[in-house]
Amino acid sequence: MEKQGKRCLRVVLVPCPFQGHINPMLQLGSILHSNGFSITVVHVQYNSPDPSTHPVFSFIPLPDSSSDQSIIGGRSVDFLLELNAKCKARFPECLAQVMTQIGLHDRIACIIYDEFMYFSEETAKDLKLPSIILRTASASNFFCS
């Protein structure tokens, strides 16, 4: 939102580090940005998004958040469990960094996180911030049970 006398609303995006998850999250960020929101992407270091493709977004890496050994070994479930456990401790620090950077005139409107990055929900609740889950899977996945 425009900063001239108004508060700027910022959306924090937390994508899963898989290509079929990163692109939809960044596309959503572009749509929100075109509607006046500032965008911060909090991402893991494994397969991190390229900030040069979205120069108007802020990118904050979660330090030491992932090891690619599980994913290389084909153990994607183990990778996601390990990733969520590591990020759970570091995500509040990253949000504190975002809040420090945006100052008094801005505020975080909500956190939008990938369904596999569920550590985000607990932090959002602790900080009393609204949160939204982005599911990148097809609706047909829910039909087939």
Image (spheres, rainbow, N blue to C red):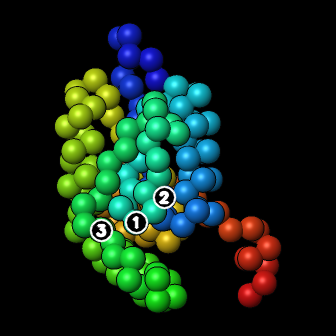
Res. 77 visible in picture: no
From the top left corner, tell me how far across and down residue 35 is, in percent: 58, 28
**Vertical placement of 73 versus 112: above or below?**
below
| 54 relative to 24 in the view: left or right | left
Q: Which mark is residue 46?
A: 1
Q: How many marks?
A: 3
From the top left corner, tell me how far across and down residue 52 is, in percent: 46, 38
For the residues carrying marks 2 and 3, which lies nearer the camera in this image? 3
Q: Amino acid at mark 1?
A: Tyr
The residue that mark 2 highlights is: 15
Res. 26 visible in picture: yes
Residue shown at 37% from the left, 62% from the top: 44
**Vertical placement of 122 versus 129: above or below?**
below
For the residues marked 2 and 3, what is the alpha-carbon distance in whole angstroms?
A: 13 Å
Residue shown at 27% from the left, 32% from the top: 102
Q: Earlier in the sequence, mark 2 or mark 3?
A: 2
Image quadrant where residue 14 sits: bottom left
Q: Which image quarter is the C terminus in?
A: bottom right
Tag 3's secondary structure?
loop
Asked whether disc 3 touches disc 1, contact meaning CB atoms under 8 Å apart, the reply is yes
Asked whether disc 2 touches disc 3, contact meaning CB atoms under 8 Å apart, the reply is no
Q: Earlier in the sequence, mark 2 or mark 1?
A: 2
Q: Amino acid at mark 2?
A: Pro
Residue shown at 25% from the left, 52% from the top: 94
Q: Amino acid at mark 3?
A: Ser
The residue that mark 3 highlights is: 65
Q: Earlier in the sequence, mark 3 or mark 1?
A: 1
For the residues carrying marks 3 and 1, which lies nearer the camera in this image? 1
